[in-house]
Image (cartoon, grey):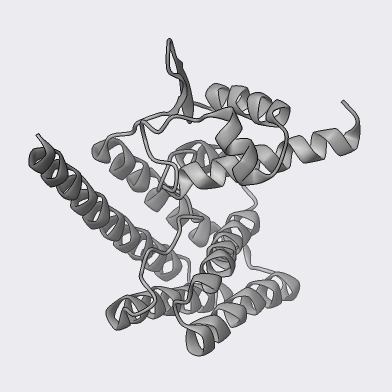
Amino acid sequence: MEQTGLVRQQIVVDRLRELIMSGELAGGDRLLEIALSEKLQVSRTPIREALIILSEDGLVEYRPNRGYVVRTFTLDYIMDAYIIRETLEGVACRLAAEKGISEESYRKMEAVLGQADHILNEVGLKDEARAPLREINDQFHRFIVEAADNAVLGQALSSATNIPYSSSRVAHWYSQDDPEGLFQLRALHAQHHAILAAIRAGEGYRAETLMRGHIAGSAEGIRRRLERREAETDAASAANG
């Protein structure tokens, strides 16, 4: 496959992974090649190849007579992943603070936080804000891991976050007309600023503690949402049964 073909293939893999990681494609959902090719506006061949790759990653599984489906992860399993993420990203913050970050790294992180400031203050929770907020959140967390400069930690974190709902790219689910959701999102974002300030000041313990609290808070939000979704599904099944 030519280089351009490899790039296109990776784009399809990344887009499908994003749909699964954010929960838009939920556990048990069938992954039909025709429907996915129409959704992503690509041919069926890269879809088929992407499903094989995602199966090897453990995100989808092949079932006889059903084809590929999104793998189902229990709530306990997802929460276990958050425990690992909390620990590893906390350590990443401590290492980054103790080693010291360059002015370039600091400006880079400050810039992405500034972008989020603008979105949360000027755009709010409109649908068009979801993708950029998701990308900004992921960039900030990745920048910290890069600043920690520990390859083993990065590899372990990559494994722990290759689970739906567990990565820093989780979609923000708050609806557009949700003042409480906007307040919660702004509070979480303010924690980013505090974490960056602690890292720049070289306060390793404080930076680690702030990040651990930040991740734990995110995990609690995920837990509440998934429990609510499960209850709604059970209620709907009982009503139809």
Name the quadrant of the C terminus.
Answer: top left
At x 11%, y 46%, the residue is 235
Say which of 134 and 228 sits in front. Answer: 228
Say which of 113 and 232 sits in front. Answer: 232
At which x and y percent is residue 153? 54, 43
At x 43%, y 18%, the residue is 66
Say which of 175 and 220 sits in front. Answer: 175
- Residue 90 found in image quarter: bottom left
At which x and y percent is residue 192? 48, 73
218 in relation to 117, above or below? above
At x 50%, y 30%, the residue is 31
At x 52%, y 84%, the residue is 123
At which x and y percent is residue 54? 57, 29
At which x and y percent is residue 103? 72, 76
Relative to residue 77, is residue 135 drawn left or right?
right
Please identify the residue farthest to the top as the structure is shown: 64
Relative to residue 78, is residue 76 drawn left or right?
left
Q: Can see residue 153? A: no
73 in relation to 114, above or below? above
Relative to residue 56, is residue 172 drawn left or right?
left
